[in-house]
């Protein structure tokens, strides 16, 4: 649930209402009716209580071991590289607000800190350090732990933190997903003794999506497919993105693509997902469209569900790493295509009948035959 924007006088009363809700849940075990506490906050408080934690306990912001930090930074070097230009833009956006940005790994360990962090304030110094463990297990309810647990953008203000020691912080957080849809970390904006700014939740979510897109685009690929609903402009930050290899297999996608397409992306090591398993047209048409010298009208992309999207196929920019086809793949593909083409001929061109005879899907028939035109 996303809390609606509140008028100034209502915001002024919020600390008292938060305190009442804390007392009711932490001392009496339930929230009062009409409490202005998001359900995810209540769930986090309850998890902290289940671990035997109490709000009055002292909070210690511990560093992970040097070995654990090196391992995290090595595992997340692609994320750090993709995040760098986005963090620079984000820091400019929040300049003068007394907020700073934290980037964490999937366990809540800080891997980068950017922005106007007041080094004279011990509360800012405590959390604004690379290597600090800011997971829910370590420091209770925070935007960091909540975003990693709830997998959604969150806003957390002062008394909504579990521990009393964290009551000076206000923070917005959003999870970060890798090209296969797995949570790989989170982005956080934190201020100390600052006014409530719930609009930062939108900013941090937008910045997190920009980092995901940059992470996808820096991976080697043979074709990038931009997706959106008919009538929506293509080429903007709202596009779904699919990265394909030279044979049309899906290498990864962004969060928008996973919302637009009806099937989830397959994780590494799982069954291969091909673009024609998602889009009901010969996959070679996407590459043909991308090779056109002048921009064409958006592609009409029918889905197997019956929905239709529009798309734009783009070859990698000059100098970008290109995903090559696997060794020997053309020969294997030609053999498979010959066998499937014969089945289609035996079925008098009826692709559905040929697919049933072969025990495969129509999507697979179209994929294996590439540009074959059946009915």
Image (cartoon, rainbow, N blue to C red):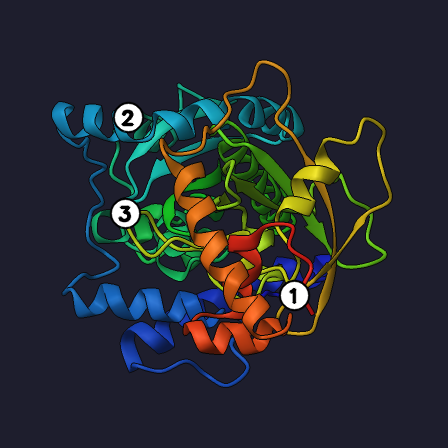
Q: Nearer the viewer, residue 277 or 188?
A: 277
116 vs 331, left or right, is: right
Q: Residue at x 20, y 61 (%)?
A: 54
Whether residue 339 is situated above or below residue 291 in the rendered picture: below
Helix, strand or loop under label 3: loop
Which residue is the site of mark 1? 303
Q: Residue at x 48, y 78 (%)?
A: 356
Which numbered disc flags the more N-terminal residue, 3 or 1?
A: 3
Which numbered disc flags the more N-terminal residue, 3 or 2?
A: 2
Mark yes or no: residue 154 visible.
Answer: no
**In the image, residue 73 lies at what x, y percent?**
28, 26
**In the image, residue 70 lies at what x, y percent?**
20, 23
Marks 2 and 1 sit apart, C-alpha to C-alpha, by 39 Å
**Disc sitting over residue 135 in the figure:** 3
Where the N terminus falls, by quadrant? bottom right
Where the C terminus falls, by quadrant? bottom right
**In the image, residue 183 lies at what x, y percent?**
38, 49
In the picture as drawn, the residue positioned furthest to the bottom comes out as 33
123 vs 349, left or right, is: left
Q: Residue at x 28, y 37 (%)?
A: 109
Q: Residues within 10 Å of mark 1 (few under 14, many from 20)?
A: some
Which residue is the site of mark 2? 73
Marks 3 and 2 sit apart, C-alpha to C-alpha, by 17 Å
Which numbered disc flags the more N-terminal residue, 2 or 1?
A: 2
């Amino acid at each position: 649930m996303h809390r609606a924007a509140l008028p100034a006088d209502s915001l002024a009363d919020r600390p008292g209402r938060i305190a009442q809700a804390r007392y009711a849940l932490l001392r009496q075990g339930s929230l009062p009716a009409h409490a202005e506490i998001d359900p995810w906050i209540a769930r986090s408080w309850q998890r902290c209580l289940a671990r035997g934690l109490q709000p009055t306990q002292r909070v210690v912001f511990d560093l992970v071991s040097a070995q654990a930090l090196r391992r995290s930074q090595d595992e997340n070097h692609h994320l750090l590289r993709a995040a760098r230009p986005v963090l620079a833009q984000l820091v400019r956006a929040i300049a003068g607000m007394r907020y700073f940005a934290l980037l964490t790994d999937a366990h809540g360990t800080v891997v980068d800190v950017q922005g106007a962090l007041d080094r004279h304030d011990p509360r800012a110094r405590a959390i604004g350090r690379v290597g600090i463990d800011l997971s829910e297990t370590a420091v209770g309810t925070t935007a960091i732990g909540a975003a990693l647990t709830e997998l959604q953008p969150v806003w957390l203000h002062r008394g909504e933190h579990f521990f009393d020691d964290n009551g000076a912080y206000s923070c917005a957080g959003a999870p970060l997903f890798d090209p296969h849809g797995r949570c790989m970390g989170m982005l956080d904006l934190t201020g100390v003794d600052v006014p409530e700014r719930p609009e930062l939740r939108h900013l941090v979510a937008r910045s997190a999506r920009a980092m995901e897109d940059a992470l996808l685009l820096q991976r080697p690929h043979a074709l990038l497919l931009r997706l959106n609903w008919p009538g929506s402009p293509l080429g903007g930050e709202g596009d779904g993105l699919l990265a394909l290899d030279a044979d049309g297999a899906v290498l990864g996608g962004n969060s928008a693509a996973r919302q637009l397409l009806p099937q989830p992306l397959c994780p590494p090591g799982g069954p291969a997902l091909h673009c024609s398993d998602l889009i009901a047209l010969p996959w070679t048409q996407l590459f043909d469209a991308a090779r056109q010298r002048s921009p064409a009208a958006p592609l009409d992309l029918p889905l197997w569900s019956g929905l239709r999207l529009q798309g734009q196929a783009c070859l990698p920019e000059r100098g970008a790493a290109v995903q090559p086809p696997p060794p020997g793949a053309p020969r294997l593909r030609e053999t498979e295509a010959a066998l499937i083409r014969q089945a289609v001929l035996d079925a008098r061109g009826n692709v559905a009948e040929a697919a049933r005879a072969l025990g495969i899907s129509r999507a697979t028939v179209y994929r294996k035959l590439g540009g074959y035109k059946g009915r």
